[in-house]
């Protein structure tokens, strides 16, 4: 298994998919606007690459729960996993 260089940013498709999932969880599951996610994305993307890597180890649903101040139901967890599988990005998905 290759180790990611902490000075190299994550590939853009992975970052875009992460934030799209956060926004979808906020709007679809919690009926919340994506504004806080968009502001946080800008803040995270201004950090050094190594700090961004640590942040992106968290899953998007947990972040959306924190931003919304709500907890996802079991059904929403299942829906989230189905959404993640739809991205077809190697190594993406907090499923391993």
Image (cartoon, rainbow, N blue to C red):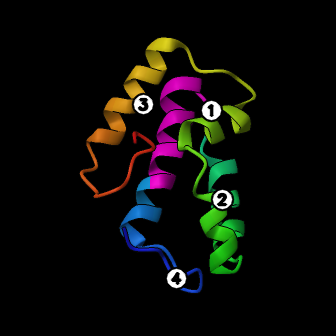
Question: Who's the residue at 71% across and 39% down the image?
Answer: 67
In the rendered image, the residue lying farthest to the front is 1
Q: Residue 1: x and y, percent?
A: 36, 67
Question: Who's the residue at 41% across and 72% down the image?
Answer: 12
Compare marks 4 and 1 and give the one earlier in the sequence: 4
Please report contact status of discs 3 and 4: CB closer than 8 Å, yes or no.
no
Label 1's element?
Answer: loop
Q: How far, Cα to Cα, is label 2 from label 4?
A: 15 Å
Tell me the tag on residue 50.
none
Q: Image check: 84 left or right of 33?
A: left
Q: Magenta: predominant secondary structure element?
A: helix
Q: Disc 4 or disc 1, which is closer to the eye?
A: 4
Q: How far, Cα to Cα, is label 1 from label 3?
A: 16 Å
Q: Residue 71: x and y, percent?
A: 66, 21
Q: Which residue is mark 3?
A: 80
Question: Which of the pair 86/36 is nearer the observer?
Answer: 86
Compare marks 1 and 3 and give the one earlier in the sequence: 1
Q: How far, Cα to Cα, is label 3 from label 4?
A: 29 Å
Q: Disc 3 or disc 2, which is closer to the eye?
A: 2
Q: Disc 3 or disc 4, which is closer to the eye?
A: 4
Q: Which residue is mark 4?
A: 5
Q: Residue 85: x and y, percent?
A: 29, 40
Compare marks 3 and 2 and give the one earlier in the sequence: 2
Q: Is residue 28 magenta?
A: yes
Q: How far, Cα to Cα, is label 2 from label 1?
A: 22 Å
**Quadrant in the rendering for residue 72:** top right
Span shown in magenta: 18-32
Q: Which residue is mark 1?
A: 32
Q: Which residue is mark 2?
A: 55
In the rendered image, the residue lying farthest to the right is 69
């Amino acid at each position: 298994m290759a180790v990611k260089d902490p000075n190299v940013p994550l590939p853009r498709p992975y970052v875009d998919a992460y934030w799209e999932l956060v926004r979808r969880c906020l709007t679809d599951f919690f009926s919340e606007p994506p504004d806080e996610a968009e502001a946080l994305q800008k803040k995270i993307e201004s950090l050094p690459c190594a700090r961004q890597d640590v942040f992106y180890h968290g899953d998007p649903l947990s972040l959306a729960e924190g931003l919304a101040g709500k907890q996802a139901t079991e059904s929403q967890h299942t829906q989230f996993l189905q959404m993640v599988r739809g991205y077809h990005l190697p190594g993406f998905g907090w499923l391993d």
